[in-house]
Amino acid sequence: QVQLVESGGGSVQAGGSLTLSCVASGITFSRHCMGWFRQAPGKEREGVASAYTDVRGSTLYADSVKGRFTISRDNAKNTLYLQMNSLKPEDTAMYYCAAVLALSGCSAYGLQSFQYNYWGQGTQVTVSS
């Protein structure tokens, strides 16, 4: 049974930082493209960042988070991370971890949520001004 469990969300003031974690089980973590997505109330789910097993040169970020967020993964611990710095109120959303089996990287999947077939339950991030 595949499980993706997110943690690390919370409430912070604008300019603050948070680090999200996602622990995966039931999948061969290193063979999956992993992504972070978010959904704010009344808005569609949007891709935030994705990374393949070797993050060097294999990461993708939404324009809205480039330079502020960093995705990383520890394949030995089956864990995906999202370091979020310089948070803004518009970053407020439920953040989801997602996975899709990938043979050669994330480029075919990008940040399109419909491409990912395993999802966690989400962790809430609230940024106040």
Image (cartoon, grey):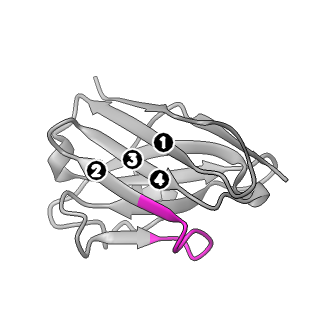
Q: Residue at x 33, y 33 (%)?
A: 23
Residue at (42, 39) in percent of width and height: 21
Of the image marks 1 and 3, the number of the one nearer the N terminus = 1
Along the polypeptide, which appears first: circle 2 or circle 4?
2
Q: Is residue 69 magenta?
A: yes
Q: Position of residue 104 (x, y in %)?
A: 16, 67
Q: Is residue 30 left or right of residue 7?
A: left
The type of residue carrying mark 1 is: Leu
Q: Which residue is mark 4?
A: 83
Pointer 2 residue: 73
Identify the residue position indicated by label 3 in the image: 81
Task: Mark 2 vs mark 4: give the one in front.
Answer: 4
Q: Secondary structure at mark 1?
A: strand
Residue 107 position within the rendered picture, expressed as x and y whole percent measured from the top left: 31, 73
Q: Residue type at mark 4?
A: Gln
Q: Which element type, helix, strand or loop, lies under badge 3?
A: strand
Cα gap from disc 2 to disc 1, whole angstroms: 11 Å
**Residue neighbourhood size for the residue with mark 1, other residues' Cα within 10 Å, grouped as few (<14), some (14–19), many (≥20):** many
